[in-house]
Image: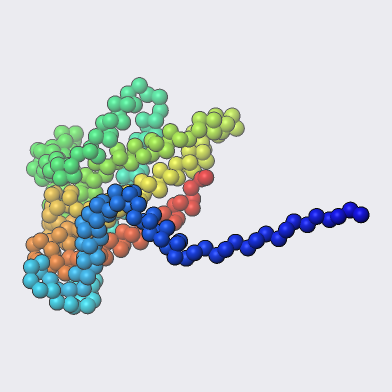
Amino acid sequence: MASTLRPAPAERAAPPDAAAHRRRRGARFLSPPWWFAAPALAVYALVVLYPSLSGILYAFTDWNGLGDRSFVGLDNFTKLFGDDAARGSLVNTLLLTVAIVVVQNGVGLLLALGVHTGIRSRTVLRVVFFAPAVVSPVMVAFLWKYIYNPSPDAGLNGILGAVGLGGLRQDWLGDPDLAIWSIAGMVIWQFAGYSMVIFLAGLEGVPAELHEAAMIDGAGRFQRFRHVTWPLLAPAVTINLMLSTIGGLKLFDQVYAATNGGPGHASETLSTVLYKQAFVFGNFGYSTAIALVLALFVAAVSMVQIHYLRGREVA
């Protein structure tokens, strides 16, 4: 009679010793790698985390930077949204951001497409277009202050007069209706080459085989760009849109150096209002509230961009 062999039931594993498990976790935490990182973490906490958390608390106080702080609740935020100058600076910030995002990325894409071809001077052109991005924004502002010289025979006005367009001469930084757009122009000039480099990296990643297959199917140049190149540029578009949006929302250097927010408050941005409230008028609590609102706004816009644009990228 054949016997049936049955495997012996497996012994139930003994429950792990909770105390021993905690000891092992503690030993891992106290192992040398953690100690190596401890100085950097301590400096980060002291230099970044503590000031950031303190800044959030200062936003709810009335403080001049030296004396005692008095808690005022939401008064700083109420003042911010009820202040005509602050609301005007918010509008200016949004206008600058939209202009910079649209024009800078559009020009950057056109430059990238132009120098991505097989022209002999493409390397030199890439360097020339990218060079302004490595210059200090303050130096760029002073350069463009000379270009925007209101004298009819200097700078841009002199060029317009020389080519027979003297009727277009303007006080580019002194006219309240033109100042903000003149600043947008200098920012776009400086960073369009930066956007170009990112777009170039995306163009380098587009397989040539896809263009060849599209040409065989009879697709024209515009159709190849629309259906082949553009979808594969989505990661580069995402990066450029995020960088230009953040740069526009926190724009300070060029505005402060070129116009100091003038004439009047025509070119004030949230960053310049923040600076003046803190270091000119001594309203550190109010300026911290402005900084907190600006930081939350930048974070919200960035999260929306990431969520929307990442979903449109081609895997």
Q: Is residue 173 left or right of residue 226?
A: left
Q: Name the quadrant containing residue 137.
A: top left
Q: Position of residue 33 (x, y in %)?
A: 34, 49
Q: How many marks?
A: 0
Q: Nearer the viewer, residue 313 or 26?
A: 26
Q: Quadrant of the N terminus?
A: bottom right
User: Which residue appears at 7% of the width and 71% of the height?
Assistant: 67
User: Which residue appears at 42% of the width and 38% of the height?
Assistant: 202
Q: Is residue 120 left or right of residue 134?
A: right
Can residue 273 be seen? yes
Q: Position of residue 162 (x, y in %)?
A: 15, 33
Q: Position of residue 98 (x, y in %)?
A: 31, 53
Q: Is residue 36 left or right of residue 211?
A: left
| Colouring chosen for the image of the structure | rainbow
Q: Position of residue 130 (x, y in %)?
A: 27, 35
Q: Residue furthest right?
A: 1
User: Which residue appears at 28% of the width and 61% of the height?
Assistant: 295
User: Which residue appears at 17% of the width and 65% of the height?
Assistant: 287
